[in-house]
C-alpha cells in the first residue's frame, strides 16, 4: 500500500530521515543520512520503492520489512525488536499500526520533527508507542513504550531499536576501556552477523560504547560517511551492528534487561532508554551534531566554566583544616574559581573502607563543621563544591549497621564488595529519602555550588533484597529521580557526573549534569587520547580536565607544565595537585595558563571541535574553531616519537575557506625542539597569513616536537578581508 500521507520526511542540521509508515506493520526507515533535497510526497513514494529489495531464491514469498522494532513474524532473521512472553506464549509479536503522525515535540530541540506511531498486538495483549525525533542539529533519537493490555503478566526480555545502515558501511568503530583508561577505540570489519557490545555493570561503564559507529572503509574524523548510536542509559545496555546476507544492515540497541526485571501487568508500561543516533561526513561532523544538541538543552551551563581546584590528588583522605586553608589560599592566587572538597569529609571516612552512607560531617576531622573552610573559600571569591557517592554504602557505616535491608542483593546472599562497598537500594523509599534529605540539608547548609557525584563500583548481583528480584533497571531510574529532585530543590546547583573517572558519561546522565570527570588518569598523554574519544559525544566544556602533579600518580610518567596545561586547556580546566608544594616558577606558569584559559574559554566553549587525520599516528592535531569562524586554537601534539622528522605538512580544518587568517604560535604552550637555533619551521617565528581554504587543503609545515609535548597556534582573521 502506498498511502503517501503515511510517508514522512524529517530534515534538519544536514540530515534527512524518511519514515515509511504505510501499510499495517511497524514503521520502517527508508533513509537516514545525508540531507535530501526537498522531496514531494510522490517523490518519497518513489524513494521507498527504489529501496525495496527483490525476492530471491529460498526466501519468504513476500517482502521482508525492516521495522524500527524488527519482527521475526515478518520473516526478519536478525535480532528482534521486542522479545518476551506470557508464560511461554506470545513469543513472537505481530504489531499492527493504528496511528502514525508527526507533531510538535515537548522538547524544543526537536521542534515539530517528532514522529509518533501507535501499534498493538491484541492477541499478545500489548500496545506500543514508538517515538522518533530529529533535533535542530540533526541528532536522531528513538524510543518505545510497551504497555500490557491483557490480564496476567507479560515478561519483557528485551527491547532493541534498530536503524538501517547501507552496504557502504564496512567498518565498525566502538569503544572499550577500564579504570584510568577509558574510551579506547577499537575498529573492525563490519562482517555478516551480529556484532554486540553489552554493558552488564549496572552503570554506564569504563568500557561502554559511548559511540557504536559504522562507516565507509577507512572513515576518519574528516572523511567518509559514518552512522553512530548510543544507548543513553546509565545502567545495563546493549549496542549492536548487524548485517544479514539479505543485504540489510542495522545499528541499534536498548536496555539489557535482567531475567524477570520487567513484568507488565495489565496497564503497566515500560519505556526504553533513548537510542541516540548521529550521522556525519567524518566523525567531526557526527560529533558536532551531538555537541550542538547538548548545548541546546534547557539549563545547559551558560556561565563561564570556572577553573576548578579538586583536593583529591592534593591530599587524598588526609583532610586537615590548616592544609586545606593553605591550599585554598594558593588556589585563589593562581586564579581558581571553584574549590572542590573531595572524598574524606564525612562521618568515619578516614580511608575507603568506611563511612559511605553516613552523609554528615566528621566531627573528629571537622570539629567546627566545614564552616571555617567554606568561609575562607568564599572570602577568597571562589565557589564551593563537595564530593558525594550517593548510591553507595560501606558495611562499616552506621547506615549499614542500622539498615542492612538497604543493601542491594538477591536476598539470600551478599554480593562481593568492591572498594569495600556495597550498593544502596535506591528503589527502597526509606533509603532514597535518607540520601536525598542528607544531601539536600548539606547543600542548603553550606550553600553548595557544585556536587561531584561519584559511583565507584559495578553492580553485581544487584537485586531488591526483600523480593529477591533483579533491581538494576529500578536503580537506574531511581538515580535519575534522585538527581532530578535535588536539582529541583536547588536549581543553582551544578553536578559533575563521575564514576571512578569516566564510567558514567552517557547522554542521559548528561541531560542532568554540567560536567563529567572523564578519567581518574590525569596523565596528559593518556588524557589526549581519552578526551579525543570521549569528546566525540561530549562537548569540551563539559569534560573536566585537570593539571595534575608533574609526575602523574596513575602512570608515574612525568610531563612538563606546557603539556599538562596545554592538554587541560581544551576542556573544563582544573588543577589537581598540592599547590602548597609547587615551586614559585610552577605557580607563575600555572597562573599564566589559567589567565589564558579565561581569555579563550568564552568562544572555545561554544566552538566546533576539529581533530586532524594526520597520516602519522604519532602526531595529532586538536583544535576548536569559534562558532563564527573568526578564530581558532589548534594544538600540535606529539604523542610519541616518529620515524619521520620533521613531521611534514599539517592541514588545519574547520576554517572559513574564503577568509584570510593569521596563524601565530601561542606561548606558553611550546614543546618545540630547537635544532641549530631553528625553533620551528620557517613560518613559526613571525607567523603566517593564508586563506582558510589553503590552510585546510594545503596546510603548513608542522613544528618538530619532543615526544609527549605540544605546541599551540592561535588562528585569527586578518583585517585585510578576502583572499580568494
Ligand atoms: C573516584 C573518583 C576520584 C575520587 C575518588 C575518591 O575514584 O573518580 O576522582 O573522587 O573516587 O574516593
Image: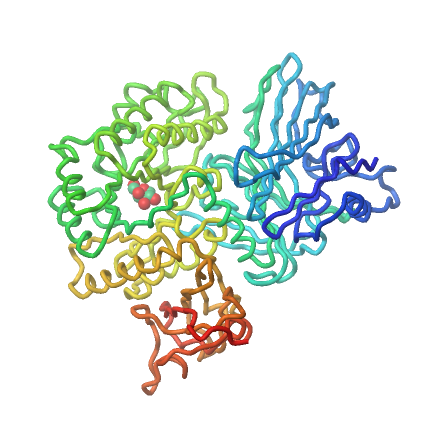
Please identify the quarter of the rendering in which residue 106 is found: top right
Q: Which residue is drawn at 49% across and 62% down?
A: 611
* Residue at 74% from the left image edge and 33% from the top image edge: 72
The image shows residue 203 at horizontal and vertical percentages of 45, 37
In percent of width and height, residue 123 lies at 74, 18
Quarter the C terminus occupies:
bottom right
The image quarter containing residue 85 is top right
Locate residue 361: give its quadrant: top left
Left or right, residue 582 beside residue 30? left
Q: How many labels does the image show?
A: 0
Measured as percent of width and height from the top left, residue 525 is found at 38, 61
User: Where is the N terminus found, in terms of image quarters?
Assistant: top right
Q: 547 and 118: which one is in front?
A: 118
Q: Nearer the viewer, residue 564 or 485?
A: 485
Residue at image position (88%, 45%) is 57
Residue 241 can be seen in this image = yes
Residue 302: x, y in percent?
Answer: 37, 46
> Does residue 499 appear anywhere in the picture?
no
Instruction: Relative to 584, say whether 256 is above or below.
Output: above
Judge by depth and name the residue closer to the eye, 330 or 59. Answer: 330
Q: In this view, does 76 lie above or below 219?
A: above
The residue that appears at 77% across and 43% down in the rendered structure is: 41
Q: Which residue appears farthest toward the top when viewing the image?
A: 151
| Apparent side of residue 709 relative to residue 411 in the rendered image (left or right) | left
Answer with the quadrant where ligand 1 appears in the image: top left
Q: Is residue 61 above or below residue 435?
A: below
Viewer-nearest residue: 342 or 377? 377
User: Furthest-bottom residue in view?
Assistant: 676
| Above or below, comparing residue 463 to residue 51 in the picture | above
Left/right of residue 22 with respect to residue 410 in the rendered view: right
Amino acid at each position: 500500500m502506498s498511502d503517501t500521507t503515511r510517508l514522512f520526511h524529517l530534515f534538519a542540521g544536514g540530515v534527512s530521515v524518511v519514515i515509511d509508515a504505510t501499510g499495517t506493520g511497524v514503521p520502517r526507515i527508508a533513509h537516514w543520512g545525508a540531507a535530501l533535497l526537498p522531496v514531494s510526497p510522490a517523490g518519497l513514494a518513489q524513494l521507498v520503492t527504489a529501496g525495496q529489495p527483490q525476492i530471491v531464491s529460498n526466501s519468504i514469498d513476500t517482502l521482508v520489512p525492516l521495522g524500527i522494532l524488527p519482527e521475526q513474524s515478518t520473516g526478519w532473521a536478525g535480532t528482534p525488536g521486542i522479545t518476551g512472553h506470557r508464560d511461554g506464549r506470545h513469543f513472537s509479536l505481530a504489531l499492527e499500526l493504528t496511528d502514525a503522525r508527526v507533531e510538535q515535540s515537548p522538547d524544543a530541540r526537536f521542534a515539530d520533527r517528532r514522529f509518533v506511531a501507535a501499534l498493538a498486538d491484541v492477541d499478545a495483549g500489548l500496545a506500543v508507542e514508538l517515538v522518533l525525533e530529529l533535533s535542530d542539529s540533526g541528532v536522531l533519537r528513538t524510543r518505545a513504550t510497551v504497555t500490557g493490555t491483557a490480564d496476567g503478566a507479560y515478561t519483557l526480555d528485551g527491547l532493541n531499536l534498530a536503524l538501517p545502515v547501507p552496504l557502504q558501511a564496512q567498518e565498525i568503530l566502538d569503544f572499550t576501556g577500564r579504570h584510568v583508561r577509558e574510551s579506547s577505540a577499537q575498529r573492525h570489519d563490519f562482517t555478516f552477523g551480529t556484532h554486540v557490545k553489552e554493558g552488564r555493570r549496572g552503570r554506564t561503564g569504563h568500557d561502554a560504547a559511548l559511540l557504536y559507529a559504522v562507516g565507509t572503509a577507512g572513515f576518519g574524523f574528516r572523511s567518509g560517511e559514518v552512522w553512530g548510536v548510543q544507548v543513553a542509559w546509565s545502567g545495563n545496555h546493549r549496542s549492536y551492528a548487524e548485517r544479514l546476507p539479505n543485504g540489510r544492515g542495522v545499528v541499534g540497541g536498548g536496555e539489557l534487561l535482567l531475567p524477570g526485571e520487567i513484568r507488565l501487568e495489565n496497564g503497566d508500561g515500560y519505556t526504553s532508554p533513548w537510542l541516540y543516533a548521529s550521522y556525519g561526513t567524518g566523525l567531526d561532523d557526527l560529533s558536532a551534531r551531538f555537541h550542538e544538541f547538548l548545548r541546546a538543552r534547557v539549563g545547559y551551563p551558560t556561565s563561564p566554566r570556572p577553573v576548578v581546584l579538586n583536593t583529591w590528588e592534593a591530599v587524598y583522605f588526609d583532610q586537615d583544616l590548616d592544609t586545606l586553608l593553605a591550599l585554598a589560599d594558593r588556589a585563589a592566587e593562581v586564579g581558581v574559581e571553584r574549590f572542590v572538597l573531595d572524598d574524606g569529609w564525612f562521618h568515619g571516612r578516614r580511608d575507603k573502607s568506611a563511612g559511605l552512607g553516613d552523609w554528615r560531617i566528621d566531627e573528629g576531622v571537622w570539629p567546627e563543621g566545614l564552616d571555617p573552610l567554606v568561609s575562607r573559600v568564599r572570602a577568597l571569591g571562589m565557589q564551593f563544591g563537595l564530593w558525594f557517592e550517593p548510591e553507595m554504602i560501606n558495611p562499616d557505616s552506621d547506615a549499614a549497621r542500622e539498615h542492612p535491608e538497604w543493601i542491594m542483593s538477591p536476598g539470600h546472599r551478599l554480593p562481593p564488595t568492591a572498594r569495600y562497598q556495597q550498593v544502596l537500594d535506591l528503589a527502597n523509599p526509606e533509603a532514597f529519602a535518607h540520601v536525598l534529605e542528607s544531601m539536600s540539608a548539606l547543600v542548603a547548609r553550606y550553600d553548595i555550588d557544585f556536587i561531584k557525584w561519584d559511583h565507584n563500583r559495578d553492580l553485581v548481583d544487584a537485586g531488591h533484597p526483600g523480593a529477591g528480584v533483579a533491581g538494576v533497571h529500578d536503580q537506574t531510574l531511581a538515580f535519575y529521580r534522585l538527581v532530578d529532585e535535588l536539582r529541583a530543590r536547588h536549581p543553582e546547583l551544578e553536578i559533575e557526573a563521575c564514576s571512578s573517572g569516566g564510567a558514567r558519561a552517557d547522554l542521559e546522565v548528561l541531560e542532568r549534569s554540567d560536567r563529567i570527570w572523564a578519567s581518574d588518569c590525569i596523565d596528559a598523554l593518556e588524557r589526549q587520547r581519552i578526551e579525543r574519544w570521549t569528546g566525540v559525544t561530549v562537548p569540551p566544556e563539559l569534560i573536566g580536565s585537570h593539571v595534575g602533579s608533574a609526575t602523574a600518580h596513575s602512570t608515574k610518567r612525568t610531563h612538563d607544565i606546557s603539556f599538562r596545561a596545554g592538554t587541560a586547556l581544551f576542556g573544563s580546566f582544573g588543577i589537581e595537585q598540592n599547590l602548597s608544594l609547587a615551586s614559585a616558577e610552577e605557580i607563575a606558569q600555572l597562573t599564566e595558563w589559567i589567565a589564558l584559559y579565561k581569555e579563550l574559554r568564552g568562544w572555545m566553549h561554544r566552538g566546533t571541535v576539529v581533530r586532524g587525520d594526520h597520516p602519522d599516528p604519532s602526531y595529532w592535531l586538536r583544535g576548536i574553531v569559534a562558532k563564527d569562524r573568526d578564530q581558532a586554537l589548534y594544538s600540535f601534539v606529539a604523542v610519541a616519537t616518529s620515524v619521520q622528522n620533521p613531521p611534514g605538512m599539517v592541514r588545519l580544518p574547520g576554517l572559513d575557506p574564503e577568509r584570510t587568517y593569521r596563524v601565530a604560535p601561542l606561548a606558553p604552550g611550546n614543546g618545540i625542539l630547537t635544532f641549530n637555533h631553528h625553533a620551528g619551521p620557517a613560518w613559526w617565528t613571525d607567523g603566517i597569513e593564508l586563506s582558510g581554504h589553503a590552510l585546510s587543503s594545503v596546510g603548513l609545515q608542522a613544528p618538530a616536537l619532543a615526544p609527549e609535548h605540544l605546541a599551540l597556534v592561535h588562528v585569527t582573521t586578518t583585517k585585510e578581508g578576502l583572499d580568494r
